Amino acid sequence: PAGAGKSTIARLVARELGYIYVDTGAMYRAVTLCMIRAGLKADQEDAVGDLAEKLEIQLRTGTDGQIVLADGRDVTREIRTTEVAQLVPAVAKIERVRRLMVVKQRTMAAEGGVVMDGRDIGSKVLPDAEVKIFLTASLEERARRRYEELKQADADVTYERVLRDLAERDEIDRTRKVSPLVVAEDAYVLDTSDLTIPEVVEIIVARCRKAMEQGAVR
């Protein structure tokens, strides 16, 4: 779910393994940001779908983490604002947008050596992934983490607002018709509420290395 630490953990795991990190949530955020700039609303599904189809999204590795480019422009910070966070659930549930993003994500993962995070990766995008981790945490802890992240880009954000938005996001993600948030049958569920970031990374990397030793990872 939102705020469970997917991006932070996945980036560190990829670094530890020497793999490429793919933040799929950033791709939906980029579409949402460009939708806002174009003056469109999420209920204009055909227009948003057209925008997503034409949009060139690139994910690159920078010195401070992943860099997100939308049609060649660096939008890494802009996609993390409260406005984008509030609108991205509605964009992410547009079926055409999800189909387009899934194609891009599968292409990125086709050659292996990828750590990919997102809400539907193990269940929909990469059902044959060699290692699947379902990260979760309490709503309150997730809200605290997201608040700490958002306040760097949005001085007006409050913890209460983030808590409310996350609860609403959880409901949307669980109940949407297209790629709802579910735990894949073969995923390892890891509750990070009381774990430090290094502890979570260590647990996941250990599972990955074990899979490598058993020949399950290409």
Image (spheres, helix red, strand yellow):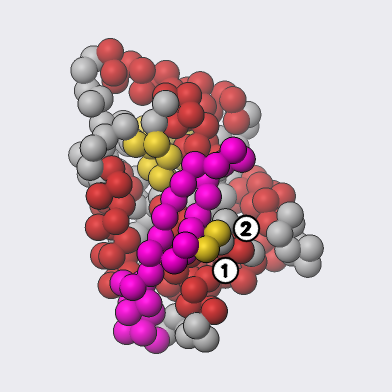
Vertical position of residue 57 compared to residue 133: above or below: below
Task: Verify whether residue 184 appears in magenta.
Answer: no
Res 78 seen here: yes
Q: Residue 39 or 72: which is nearer the viewer?
A: 72
Residue picked out by circle 2: 77
Q: Residues within 10 Å of mark 1 (few under 14, many from 20)?
A: many
Q: Which mark is residue 84?
A: 1
Closest to the observer: 198 or 51?
51
User: Where's residue 129, x and y in %?
Assistant: 26, 37
Span shown in magenta: 44-72
Which residue sits at x=43%, y=72%?
91
1 and 2 marks in contact (CB < 8 Å): no
Tag 2: amino acid: Arg
The answer to whether 35 appears left or right of 159 in the picture is left
Q: Disc 1 and disc 2: Cα gap in Å?
A: 11 Å
In the rendered structure, does residue 46 fall within the stretch colored magenta? yes
Query: Is label 2 in a helix, a strand or a loop?
Result: loop
- Kindly identify the residue that appears in the image at 39 percent across and 86 percent down: 44
In this picture, residue 33 sits left or right of residue 120: right
Identify the amino acid type marked 1.
Val
